[in-house]
Image: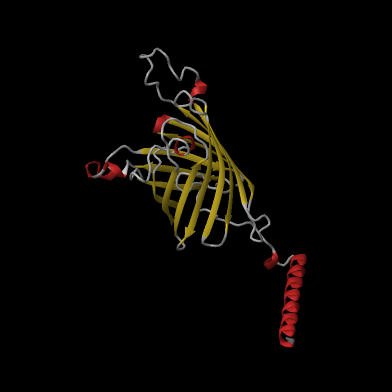
Amino acid sequence: MKKILTLTLCLSVLLFRATAQDDMLSALGDPEAVHGPVYATFKGTRLINFHTLEVPGERTLDFRIAHRFGNFNTKGYNFWGLDGGASIRLSLEYSYDGRLALGIGRSNVDKTFDGFAKYRLLRQSDDSKPPVSVTLFSGIYATSLKDADDGLLNVDKYGNFSSRLSYCHQIIVGRKFNDEFSLQIAPTLVHHNLADDLGDKNDVIIVAAAARYKLTQRLAITAEYGWRANDYAKQEYYDSFGVGIDIETGGHVFQMHLTNSFGLTENQFYSRTADSWGSKGFRLGFNISRVFTI
């Protein structure tokens, strides 16, 4: 018992001295005691489809190309989706101060134009004060499709421009747990001004999760899942789910993945993913990002 008490006392003294020394160094402004923000929680502003909590750095322009091939379940005749039926989105994202980012994009799915704003509200510190990063996101989407029934029913469902619009709002909360693993959760609201069918709801509530695990200095595996919390449509839709890899090559980040979502904007993949993994309704896709300092 005496040995245990003696050892406990010695450890307590050492811990007290170490804590006191850290406090003294911090008070004196010792560089080793100064804590800073955590960087590269995720390697890009998007993981697969989902936005991450990251924004471009100061005075940085990010040019992005997103591409999704056709469904794997179209089998060999369509070369498992590679022969056609692809979706593509081109976009630009810019931040002047590294906190507020603005972006624009164009997707061939529903001929959609989109714009968004992201703001880094909190940034995780390496001393866990704060312990998480928080980023706010809002996006607006406008389809330029013609009404397929226009002229048949003599009614244009897009007669009012507001009927072409939909919105997405998110609070993205994430943490880099160590050099390898990062995780984020994002409560999400998607609003469609025009619902698909009579009786459908305009609002969709989603809880979106995304994770990244770093394997090497230039390679990481990724995954994302968007759980739809409410029943909002007559048509059967599915939760968006994707898995992939990030490959860093100098100024580029190349992302390859499998996802069941054909749409490339939040109003599409969160609320209107029409294919399921269970029926092999996933597709091969990739994102390419190139950043420029302006």
How are the residues colored?
A: secondary structure
Q: 68 or 268, which lies in front?
A: 268
Q: In the image, what residue occupies the spot 72% across and 79% down? A: 11
Q: Position of residue 246 (x, y in %)?
A: 43, 54
Looking at the picture, does residue 113 appear above or below residue 254? Answer: above
Name the outermost residue toward the top. 154
Picture mark count? 0
Q: In the image, what residue occupies the spot 43% across and 25% down? A: 144
* Residue 139 in view in this figure: no
Question: In which quadrant is the C terminus drawn?
Answer: top right
Using the rendered view, name the quadrant where residue 72 is placed.
top left
Q: Is residue 241 left or right of residue 191?
A: left
* Residue 253 in view in this figure: yes
Q: In the image, what residue occupies the spot 35% across and 14% down? A: 152
Q: 73 or 115, which lies in front?
A: 73
Looking at the picture, does residue 260 appear above or below residue 234? Answer: below
Question: In which quadrant is the N terminus drawn?
Answer: bottom right
Q: Position of residue 16 (x, y in %)?
A: 76, 74
Q: Is residue 22 left or right of residue 253?
A: right
Q: Position of residue 122 (x, y in %)?
A: 65, 49
Q: 223 or 108, which lies in front?
A: 223
Name the outermost residue toward the left. 77
Using the rendered view, name the quadrant where residue 245 is placed.
bottom left
Q: Position of residue 171 (x, y in %)?
A: 59, 43
